[in-house]
Amino acid sequence: MTLTRRDVLKAGAAAASMSVLPSLHAMAKKGGRLRIGTSGANTSDSWDGRTHSDLYMQMVGHGCVFDCMTEVTADGSLVGELAESWSASADAKVWNFKLRQGVTFHNGKSFGADDVIESLQLHVAEGAKSAAKPIVASINDMKKVSDHEIQFTLGKGNADFPFLLSDYHLLIYPAGQTAEAIAQGIGTGLYQVVSFDPGVRFVGKRRADHYKGDAAGHFDEVEIIAINDASARMNALMTGQVDAVSRVDFKTEPLIRANPAVEIFEVTGNQHFSFPMLSKTPPYDDINVRQAIKHSFKRQELVDKILQGHGAVANDHPIGPANQYYAADLPQTTYDPDKAKSLLAKSGISSLDIDLSASDAAFPGAVDAALLFQASAKPAGINVNVVQEAADGYWSNVWLKKPFCACFWSGRATEDWMFSTTYEAGVPWNDTQWDHPKFQELLYQGRAELDSEKRRKIYYDMQEILNLEGGVVIPVYANWVDASSTKLMNSGTIGNVWAMDNARLVERWWFA
């Protein structure tokens, strides 16, 4: 079944037990060494989940070495991972989670409530810079009911709370040994660390006594290689050096499709490419300038030339077609250089000179997308200097620091999760520094509102505010387009929350 937010609330009456994974995996072939080439790696990568920001550490973190409390399956259902079941009060403010028993960390320590509490508290520790801080900060109290039961009391009701505990930042570490676990990679996941060279390579071996049994983790060993260069990544797949790769390079897609030994797997989700502006930094602190820039993008051109048709035009807000409350009928921002000129004139500007930082580390084709914007913005009197940044360190040195840059977001399973991750005032990943009082008011209303139609209206209004006043250009939704050897098999349903089957290909796929 697919568990909606309403279903999650209903679980409060009967503490519905959540299975771990579909039983169809029981017939999967066991064994072999899986080799994956993926983008999104940095030499600064570590086992500290608070710092994880791209696909590489998602895959080796919550997709390999560690577990979270809950998991979004390939079909979008919510199931328990380290949590076995949960129930909620009528106002969704108090949540009781029962934890799995018999689970051990890779160093032999037994898993229990103390581990969950200490791991979550990391995200609100003094000085912590975690994208999951808003999730944990919403919890007023974490009470250990027993060794395998925790009660969470939220500041305000949140129907999405069990979904939020699947966030890939919220890795569970052994209590009292957190520093050691972050240094060495000690989790409860299906694969134990053999070696880890940050930004280069990870090797893990299957835990024979894992609590998921034979339902998941079908490879004996897994090797995940950092290949940030798109061409090199595609070449590694086509020459058989790896069994699967992330983020297909659309320039070489015809060659990939012509190779009988490999195949492309594509899913539509909420991934979107964006160009955030630091809205408190001139000239982006002027709403007319922000709107002028939005009207200077040829969105369909980006879909056609950058995505090669693997996506759709977006409308300057992060809620995608896979979300429940997507505002499909919101008036579309169009390419209109004359309107852009008039908007600049309102601010007394006849010609605008700006820098746009870009790297293909942001998303495949980001530099080319920036150059297309450079050309389309010129008739509006906007002169764009494209700054090609280094791929390594892009997320630590450019994003959140340069006033205007290229970025991508995977999207989130719920509207509140997406909005609170990057548009709530003061959160670490607010990459526009945008703080809109009405938007913030609606954010808190929507989070606590249990009536579905009222939530729909709230989230529609929030999408509209971002479209008209926000500090980000979101021109396109991008499909997840990855590729693998034909030797690999899966259940037939591929997750669309993140790339590479929700970043859990390692535990869900097997060799034919």
Image (tube, helix red, strand yellow):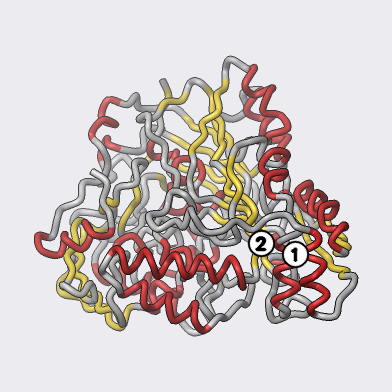
Q: Which residue is mark 2?
A: 473
Q: Nearer the viewer, residue 173 or 272?
A: 272
For residue 213, side relative to residue 406 (left or right): left
Q: Which mark is residue 293?
A: 1
Mark 1 and mark 2 residues within 8 Å of each other at the beta carbon: yes
Which kind of residue does numbered mark 2 sit on?
Answer: Val
Question: Which image quarter holds the C terminus?
Answer: top left
Coordinates of residue 179 in the picture (x, y in percent): 46, 70
Q: In the image, is residue 89 above or below residue 18?
A: below
Q: Nearer the viewer, residue 428 or 188?
A: 428
Coordinates of residue 340 in the picture (x, y in percent): 78, 65
Q: Residue at x 67, y 31 (%)?
A: 234
Which kind of residue does numbered mark 1 sit on?
Answer: Ile
Q: Residue at x 76, y 56 (%)?
A: 358
Crowding at dot 1, Cα within 10 Å, few <14 / some 14-19 / many 20+, comes out as many
In the image, farthest residue toward the left: 14
Crowding at dot 2, Cα within 10 Å, few <14 / some 14-19 / many 20+, comes out as many
Measure the alpha-carbon separation of dots 1 and 2.
8 Å
Question: Which image quarter holds the N terminus?
Answer: top left
Disc nearer the start of the sequence (1/2): 1
